[in-house]
Amino acid sequence: MVFLKYLQREFARIMSNRRAECTLTKEQLKEFARCILPDIVAYCESEKGKREFKEWKEKQQSDVPHDTKMAS
């Protein structure tokens, strides 16, 4: 639990300052990814995840200037 709190703080710090260096080791990052990957996959395969991804994708496409949109 302490390690998870550390990872959350570290992630928030990195996201708030894109130039910050990550102090996590590769092993720590791999372990974190190994822990959260099943939840990410389950969410992406859920109806809610699919719906939100579709909404996000539509928003991304609508934010692109008209002349640079790629034909789908």
Image (cartoon, rainbow, N blue to C red):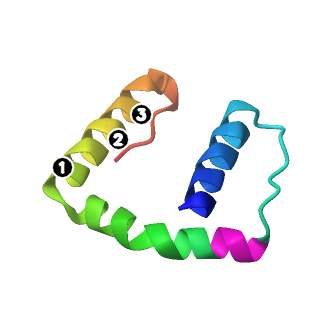
Residue 13 image offset from top left, x and y in percent? 71, 38
Q: Is residue 56 above or below residue 67?
A: below
Residue 60 image offset from top left, x and y in percent? 41, 33
Give SS at disc 3: helix
| Three-letter amino acid code of the residue under disc 2 | Lys
Marker count (numbered): 3
Q: Which residues are magenta?
A: 26-30
Residue tagged 2: 57
User: Front-most of 21 and 63?
Assistant: 21
Residue at the image point whose x is 22% and y is 53% from the top: 50
Side of 17 where 65 appears, left or right? left
Residue tagged 1: 48
Give SS at disc 2: helix
Residue tagged 3: 60
| Three-letter amino acid code of the residue under disc 3 | Gln
| Foreground disc of the pair 2, 1 | 1
Residues at circles 2 and 3 in contact by the CB criterion of under 8 Å: yes
Residue at the image point whose x is 28% and y is 59% from the top: 43
